Amino acid sequence: MHRTNIYLDEAQATRLDRIAQEQGISRSEVIRALIDRSFASGDVSVEVDLSAIEQSHGALADEEEAARDDGDRFAHLARMWSLRPGR
């Protein structure tokens, strides 16, 4: 086993602690399990994520900014959902 230090934001640490408590294991064990799951799925390519971000750049350039009240925001989100590729 190799010791590794990482920095987590408050939300990440809270979620890890909650999962660890629910499962009766340590935070470290949760992290190792999540890493193992990621490796097993083959979903460890940062390049794939960066490529998706790059391809989406400017996708909403022609869209109006969402209004700030809840009703308009939800209508805007519904419209964006309907514009997804493959819909």
Image: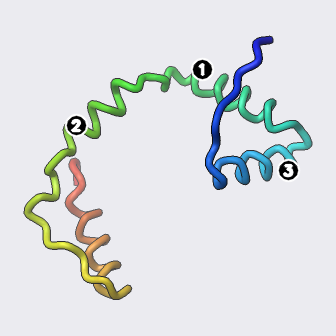
Where residue 73 appears, as percent x and y from the top left, is 32, 79
Query: Looking at the image, is mark 1 or mark 3 earlier in the sequence?
Result: 3
Q: Quadrant of the C terminus?
A: bottom left
Disc on res. 22: 3
Q: Which residue is mark 2?
A: 54
As helix, strand or loop, the secondary structure at mark 3 comes to helix
Query: Looking at the image, is mark 2 or mark 3 earlier in the sequence?
Result: 3
As helix, strand or loop, the secondary structure at mark 2 comes to helix
Classify 10 Å Cα crowding around label 1: few (below 14), some (14-19), many (20 and above): few
Residue 63: quadrant of the picture: bottom left
What residue is drawn where x is 34% and y is 78%?
74
What residue is drawn where x is 88% and y is 37%?
25
As helix, strand or loop, the secondary structure at mark 1 comes to helix
- Which residue type does callout 1 highlight? Ala
> How far apart are the alpha carbons under marks 1 and 3?
23 Å
Disc on res. 40: 1
- Which residue type does callout 2 highlight? Glu
Where residue 83 appears, as percent x and y from the top left, is 20, 60
Query: Marks 1 and 2: in contact by CB < 8 Å?
Result: no
What residue is drawn where x is 28% and y is 36%?
52
Query: Marks 3 and 1: in contact by CB < 8 Å?
Result: no
